[in-house]
């Protein structure tokens, strides 16, 4: 087996999953793919060391999130701008750009602050426990719990307001 | 909505992305190459910036002869545009013109601060006499001057920081020795002067037009406060007013014998 063969396997197995997580955090597919590819590129350069880790995909996810969030001041501004749009406008805009169509829960998620959205995605999309999120993001477990609870509350409110808007339109 | 419902709704929304094919690994290699190139150019830029900053801040400026004292702060030095230079009439030469040889004449070059804020002069004014090419005059920027004030005497003026309030004046003693034979051609040159500051522009000297002849020797003192009498050394010292002539004209013998702080040949 060539030294890069196990990396190829690792790369093919985890790419889609990481793009999903990053997309759910950023709400931007090209941005998510860019961050994931950059993280895999860095992982490839360090593969002899990383291959010895228990969970090399955790390293890649952490790097990808850092890249995405560090360059994500722009994304945050975009999300804030998106939040001002109505559900219908947002869905239409997404479909016109060829991006993933937004469902009501997707729209509600994109309207959350980045810190809460990040924790919700890691917990509900990447299936990470509170302790794992705490270790991965370097924040106290209590803070993770607070952000999860606040994010859930805000998500419920967003979904409720969407339903109200839909009823009003009818 | 409970946790499981939220999970399933998010999974349903994101499911299409789970099947996104990973791009070829050459994409990762290209990214790595681009990243290395970015890091290299950023490193080179950083090194260039640090080197430039070090050159500007730490390396000493090359001193210019007779122009300024190196190593002093330059941020409050007087700029040319804030100074008016004027020749004052020759000092202490009344009656000397009866001598068969032309005596040296001491003039005072005054520098008045015309700016709105105080500034500092530190060192020698740099004189230039842009006359015809055939006129050769020799400049000596010195701390000791052999002057005339009824008698010939030696005076010491050392470079000091002279702080000029708006409207205040500093002086420089300029002794011009015309050669015995009054070597022609002689002319009234349009003098120009640069204040002692790096890169300062030369400005015209107003007032009394001095006569110089070819091969005239010109001694220039550092700028000193205008309150200092012409016979006193500055800063005051035991050399002050040292009299070594006794009324009779004596050729100034130190001009060639003693080393000055620099000499220019101006065409």
Image (cartoon, coloured by chain):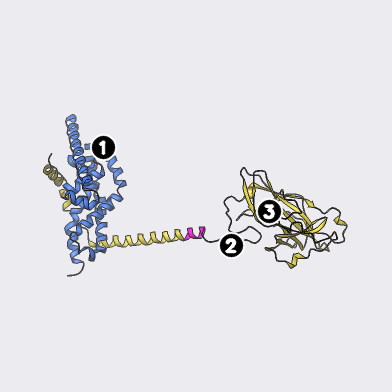
Chain colours: A blue, B yellow
Label 3 is found on which chain of the structure?
B
Q: What is the crowding at mark 3: few (fewer than 14 residues within 10 Å), some, or many (at least 20)?
A: many
Residue beneath disc 1: A85
Judge by depth and name the residue closer to the eye, A3 or B70. B70
Circle 1: element type: loop
- Write down the quadrant of residue A52 in the picture: bottom left
Between disc 3 and disc 1, the foreground one is 3
Q: Position of residue A159 (x, y in %)?
A: 18, 37
**Circle nearer the viewer, 1 or 2:** 2
Quarter of the image that includes the N terminus of chain A: bottom left
Who's the residue at 11% across and 42% down the image? Answer: B5
Which quadrant holds residue B194? Answer: bottom right
Task: Write down the quadrant of residue B140 in the picture.
Answer: bottom right
User: Is residue B28 or residue A22 the one in the foreground?
Assistant: A22
Same chain shared by disc 1 and disc 2 = no
Q: Are marks 2 and 3 in contact (CB under 8 Å)?
A: no
Chain letter of the residue beneath label 1 in the structure image: A
Up-down relation of residue B115 to residue B136 (above or below): above
Q: Residue at x 45, y 58 (%)?
A: B49
Q: Chain of mark 2?
A: B
x then y, percent, for residue A86: 24, 36
Q: Nearer the viewer, mark 2 or mark 3?
A: 3
Residue range (magenta): B51-68
Which part of the image, by quadrant, shows the C terminus of chain A? top left
What residue did someone put label 3 on? B223
**Where does the image place residue A109, in percent across and percent down from the top left?**
21, 42
Q: Which residue is mark 2?
A: B62
Q: Nearer the viewer, residue B142 or A92?
A: B142
Q: CA distance from mark 2 to mark 3?
A: 21 Å
Q: Is residue A142 magenta?
A: no
Q: Which residue is pictured at 35% across the width and 62% down the height?
A: B37
């Amino acid at each position: 087996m060539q030294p890069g063969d196990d990396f190829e396997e690792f790369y093919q197995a985890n790419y889609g999953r990481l793009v999903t997580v990053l997309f759910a955090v950023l709400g931007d597919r090209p941005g998510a793919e860019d961050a994931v590819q950059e993280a895999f590129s860095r992982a490839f350069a360090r593969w002899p060391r990383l291959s010895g880790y228990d969970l090399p995909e955790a390293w890649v996810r952490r790097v990808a999130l850092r890249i995405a969030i560090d360059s994500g001041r722009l994304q945050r501004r975009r999300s804030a701008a998106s939040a001002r749009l109505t559900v219908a406008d947002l869905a239409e805009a997404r479909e016109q750009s060829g991006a993933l169509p937004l469902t009501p829960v997707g729209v509600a998620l994109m309207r959350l602050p980045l810190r809460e959205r990040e924790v919700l995605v890691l917990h509900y999309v990447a299936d990470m426990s509170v302790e794992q999120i705490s270790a991965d993001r370097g924040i106290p477990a209590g803070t993770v719990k607070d952000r999860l609870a606040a994010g859930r509350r805000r998500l419920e409110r967003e979904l409720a307001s969407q339903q109200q808007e839909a009823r009003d339109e009818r | 909505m409970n946790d499981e419902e939220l999970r399933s709704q998010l999974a349903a929304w994101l499911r299409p992305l789970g099947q996104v094919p990973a791009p070829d690994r050459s994409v990762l290699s290209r990214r790595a190459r681009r990243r290395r190139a970015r890091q290299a150019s950023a490193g080179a830029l950083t090194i260039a910036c640090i080197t430039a900053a070090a050159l500007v801040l730490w390396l000493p400026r090359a001193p210019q002869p007779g122009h300024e004292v190196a190593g002093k702060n330059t941020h409050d030095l007087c700029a040319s545009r804030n100074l008016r230079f004027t020749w004052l009439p020759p000092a202490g030469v009344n009656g000397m013109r009866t001598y068969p040889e032309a005596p040296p004449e001491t003039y005072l070059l005054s520098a008045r601060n015309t700016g709105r804020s105080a500034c500092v002069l530190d060192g020698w004014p740099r004189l230039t006499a842009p006359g015809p090419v055939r006129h050769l005059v020799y400049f000596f920027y010195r701390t000791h001057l052999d002057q005339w004030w009824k008698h010939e005497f030696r005076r010491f003026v050392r470079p000091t920081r002279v702080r000029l309030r708006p409207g205040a004046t500093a002086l420089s003693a300029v002794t011009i020795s015309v050669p015995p034979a009054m070597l022609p051609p002689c002319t009234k040159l349009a003098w120009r002067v640069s204040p002692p500051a790096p890169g300062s522009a030369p400005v015209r000297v107003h007032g009394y037009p001095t006569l110089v002849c070819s091969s005239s020797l010109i001694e220039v003192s550092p700028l000193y406060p205008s309150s200092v009498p012409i016979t006193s050394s500055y800063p005051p010292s035991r050399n002050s007013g040292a009299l070594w002539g006794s009324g009779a004209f004596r050729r100034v013998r130190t001009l060639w014998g003693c080393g000055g702080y620099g000499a220019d040949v101006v065409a």
